[in-house]
Structures are given as C-alpha cells and as structure tokens.
Image: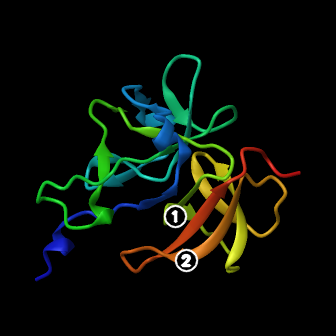
C-alpha cells in the first residue's frame, strides 16, 4: 500500500521568480476568515491551499483578491517526515481562522501551480483572471491579470506557469 494514498493531496505552487520573497514583501500573521477566502475541505477540516490570490482588506484581514495589491498564498511544505510530497501542504483553519503566508506579486513575477480553474480552456498558451481568489483560465486576454502557459509540475501533474501582469488587460 502506498503511504501517500493515506494523506491528503493539496494544490501546489512552485516559486519560479517571486520578487516579494527576495524583498521580504510578505503578509504574515494577518488572519483570514473561512468565509472570506477560497478554500477546500479535507474530511471535516477546512483547509487553505497554496495558489489562492488574495489581498489585504481595510480591516486588516486577508481576503480573496478584488483590487489593489495582489498576493499569492505560498506556504512551503514542511520537511518534518510526515509529508511525502509537494502536494502534502495545506493550512487548516482553526475556529474558522487561518494565518497564511502570502507573497506580494509584482509585474513579471512567475510561479507554477495546479490551483487553477481550467474550465473548457484547452490551449497551451492562454490567460488567467482572478475569480473569487482562484486563477481562472481564459482564451481571450481581455480582463486577464496573468499570462498562463500549460506545463508539468515536479509531481507529474499538469500545472500552469503564471506570469503576473500587475494590471488588467483591456
């Protein structure tokens, strides 16, 4: 029996080039409420996965990105012997609150993720817009904030290399 089959599999983010990591432009110790941020459920537990696009709200909480400065939820996997792969990392909500690490996105920043709503898009080269915190593929550039290119993650699953534009394409 494969031990990995007994563990959850969450979405992955591979850092390609995140200037926010180099500069230390990171949100940390700001709360996110379960009702304000895209998340998944594993068993009975609400979990925040890597790859959600968020912003800091005026009340000091992290919420799904709407406008202003965009941040990428990116917590690196814990190498503590209990995790066997890149897809084993997620942050559990406690009392409906989680404190994620979110890295600022600047023009040209790139990351690869499978936390994408592909919909009916089959193109290798396309675009993505943020819809309720989730990167959502689209063929047309209008309304997009990311250039998306289909690729493969280290785990062998399909992912998309996202390049942040720091603006919405008209």
SS class, disc 2:
strand
Location of the N terminus (image quadrant)? bottom left
Please give left or right for residue 84 compared with residue 100 in the image: left
Q: Nearer the viewer, residue 98 or 45?
A: 98
Q: Residue 14's spot in the image, x, y percent?
A: 44, 61
Q: Residue at x 57, y 46 (%)?
A: 133
Q: Residues within 10 Å of mark 2 (few under 14, many from 20)?
A: some
Nearest to the observer: residue 167 or residue 19: 19
The residue carrying pointer 1 sits among few (fewer than 14), some (14 to 19) or many (20 or more) residues within 10 Å by Cα, namely: many
Point 35% across, 61% down: residue: 10
Expressed as whole percent of the image width and height from the top left, the position of residue 2 reads 14, 80
Report helix, strand or loop for mark 1.
strand
What mark, if any, has residue 152 been given in the picture? none
According to the picture, the residue beneath numbered tag 1 turns out to be 112
Is residue 121 visible in the rendered image? The answer is no
1 and 2 marks in contact (CB < 8 Å): yes
């Amino acid at each position: 029996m494969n031990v990995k089959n007994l563990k959850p599999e969450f979405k992955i983010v591979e850092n390609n080039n995140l200037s926010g990591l180099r500069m230390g432009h990171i949100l940390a110790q700001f709360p996110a409420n379960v009702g304000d941020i895209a998340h998944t459920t594993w068993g009975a537990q609400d979990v925040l996965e890597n790859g959600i696009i968020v912003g800091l709200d005026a009340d000091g909480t992290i919420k799904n990105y709407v406008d202003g400065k965009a941040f990428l939820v990116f917590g690196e996997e814990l190498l503590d012997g209990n995790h066997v792969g890149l897809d084993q990392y997620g942050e559990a909500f406690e009392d409906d609150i989680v404190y994620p690490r979110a890295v600022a996105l600047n023009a040209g920043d790139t990351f690869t993720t499978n936390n994408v709503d592909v919909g009916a898009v089959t193109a290798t080269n396309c675009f993505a817009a943020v819809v309720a915190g989730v990167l959502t593929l689209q063929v047309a550039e209008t309304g997009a904030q990311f250039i998306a290119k289909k690729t493969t993650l280290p785990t062998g699953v399909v992912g998309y290399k996202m390049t942040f534009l720091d603006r919405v394409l008209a």
